[in-house]
Amino acid sequence: MAPENFILSTCTQADIPAMVELNLSAFANDPLSNITMPREMIGEAELRRWMSQFIASFFEKPEVHFFKITETHTGNLAAWMRCAFPHVLSEEESEKRKAEKERKVKDKSFWPKGANLDVINVKFGTLGQLKESYCNDSETYYVQLLATNPAYQRRGLASKLLKHVLQVADREGRMSYIEATEAGFPVYQKLLFKQVDIIEVDLSRWGGKGTVSNRIMQREPQPIL
C-alpha cells in the first residue's frame, strides 16, 4: 500500500508536460522504446512536442480515464495511468477510430521524424491485432499505459493505481486487460492478471541486442469480500 504522503486523483490536460517527462524517465532504459523512438534521431524538443500532442488526443475520448499519484509535500507527479473503461461506440465512430488507428500505424507523417516505423508496425500492429482477439471493449477495463517515476519505484504506486480500477471492475463483474513489459509483468501477476499470449521482438533486426517481449494479460473479476 502506498504511504499516506501520496494522493490518487484524476489527471487533467494541465498535467501533460509532467506526464511527458515522467514517461521519458520511466522508459529511458527500455530497449524497445529506445529503438522505436530514438531520442538522438528525433531530438528532445520534437519528441516532447509529439508526446504532448499524442497524450492530449486521448483526453478527447470519453471512455478514456487518466489517474495520477502525486507526492503531497512536493507536488511531484510520481505515477500515472491511462485506462479505457468499457464502452460501446456508434458504428460511425467505430469506423472512424479504425481508420485512424490504421493511419497511425502506416502514415509516416503522424509519427515524429526519426521514429522507427518498421518497429512501430511490428509492435503496435501486432498489439492491435491481439487486442481485437482478447479484449471486448464493451465488457473490459483496458489499462493502456502505466508509468512510474524511477525515483518513486518500489513503493506500491503502480499497484495502487491499478487497484483503483480493478476494484471497480470487480464490483461490475468485468474483465481487465493489459499489455505487460518485462518490468511490469510480475506486478500484474500479483494482482491476478494471467498471461494469455506474448509478442517477442528480435531487436537485432534494427541493431539492438536480444529479444524483448510484451505479454498479453487478462484478469477475471474477483469476488467482493
Image (tube, rainbow, N blue to C red):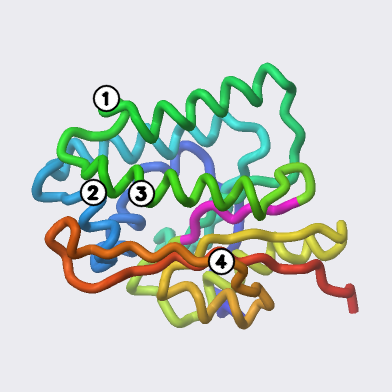
The residue that disc 3 covers is 122
> In whole angstroms, how far apart are the C-alphas of marks 3 and 2?
14 Å
Whether tag 4 and tag 3 are in contact, CB under 8 A, the answer is no
Q: For residue 143: magenta?
A: yes
Q: Distance from label 4 to label 1 (Cα)?
A: 31 Å
Q: Along the polypeptide, which appears first: circle 2 or circle 4?
A: 2
Residue drawn at (47%, 72%) of the image:
184
Residue at mark 2 to residue at mark 4: CA–CA distance: 25 Å
Q: Which mark is residue 37?
A: 2
Q: Position of residue 114 (x, y in %)?
A: 15, 39
Q: Which residue is at the far left? A: 40
The amino acid pointed to by label 1 is: Ser
Magenta highlight: main SS: strand
Task: Name the one closer to the observer, 102 or 155.
Answer: 102
- Viewer-side residue, 92 vs 118: 118
Residue of label 1: 109
Mark 3 or 2: in front is: 3
Residue at x 81% of width, y 58% of height: 174
Reply above or below: 134 against 96.
below
Depth order, front residue of 44/201: 201
In the rendered view, does 205 fall on the left or right side of 40? right
Considering only order in the chain, which callout, 2 or 3, is on the residue closer to the N terminus? Answer: 2
